[in-house]
């Protein structure tokens, strides 16, 4: 285990509108505001997106299992943001639902907002952390400087 201690810095309340790309818009904001590390929560709805819902087998690096959707679904999410190769990298786990169907996974790629998504971003100050790709694990975990 490794850890670092920091404090809450700026707090952003963000509205992402119908038809916009959720992660794309958050990436623009992170670059504009120079947010290097943060935790965030969101609620709203997505019309289109893709979730990694698990590995095919319990092996590293994992071969992801994808669940894609292209109909409006309610969404709740919690995630973090750290820099990877000098750009904001999001790790966002979301629960999506429509009717009796609920899925939980890591939202990746393009995602289209349905109506609105509201995001609350809490910047973390006082830590120096980055995401660095680890080929053995197949992803970029947080590394502390």
Image (tube, grey):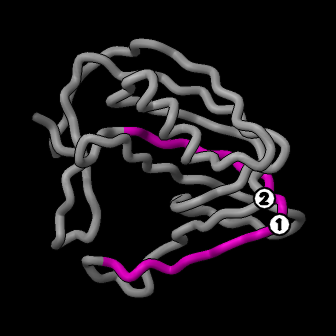
Residue at image mark 1: 71
Real-space Cα separation, disc 2 to disc 1, in angstroms: 5 Å
The numbered dot on residue 47 is 2
Q: Residue at x 89, y 64 (%)?
A: 99
Quadrant of the rendered image containing residue 13: top right
* Secondary structure category for the residue under label 2: strand
Quadrant of the rendered image containing residue 105: bottom right
Whether residue 59 is situated above or below residue 70 in the rendered picture: below
Looking at the picture, how far across and down is residue 54, in whole percent? 48, 74
Mark 1 neighbour density, 10 Å: few (under 14) some (14–19) many (20 or more): few
Magenta stretch: dominant SS?
strand
From which residue to which does the magenta span run? 62-81
Q: Residue at x 63, y 46 (%)?
A: 22
Q: Is residue 6 left or right of residue 143?
A: right
Closer to the chain start, of discs 2 and 1, is 2
Kindly indicate whether the residue at mark 1 contacts the one at mark 2 (C-beta within 8 angstroms). yes
Residue found at the very far left of the displayed protein: 145
Whether residue 115 is situated above or below residue 7 in the rendered picture: below
Q: Is residue 48 magenta?
A: no
Looking at the picture, how far across and down is residue 86, in whole percent? 25, 41
**The C terminus appears in which quarter of the rendering?**
top left
Q: Is residue 112 left or right of residue 125?
A: right
Whether residue 77 is situated above or below residue 46 in the rendered picture: above
Mark 2 neighbour density, 10 Å: few (under 14) some (14–19) many (20 or more): some
Q: Residue at x 72, y 71 (%)?
A: 69
Whether residue 54 is situated above or below residue 81 in the rendered picture: below
Quadrant of the rendered image containing residue 30: top left
* Secondary structure category for the residue under label 1: loop
């Amino acid at each position: 285990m490794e850890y670092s201690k920091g404090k809450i810095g700026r707090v952003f309340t963000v509205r992402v509108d119908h038809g916009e790309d959720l992660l794309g818009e958050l990436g623009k904001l992170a670059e504009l505001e120079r947010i290097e590390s943060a935790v965030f929560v969101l609620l709203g709805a997505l019309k289109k997106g893709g979730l990694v819902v698990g590995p095919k087998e319990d092996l590293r690096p994992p071969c992801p299992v994808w669940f894609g959707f292209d109909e409006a679904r309610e969404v709740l999410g919690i995630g973090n943001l750290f820099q990877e190769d000098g750009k904001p990298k999001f790790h966002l786990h979301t629960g999506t639902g429509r009717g009796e169907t609920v899925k939980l996974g890591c939202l990746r790629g393009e995602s289209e907002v349905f109506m609105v998504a509201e995001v609350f971003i809490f910047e973390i100050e006082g830590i120096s952390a980055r995401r660095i790709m680890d080929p053995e694990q197949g992803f970029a975990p947080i590394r502390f400087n």
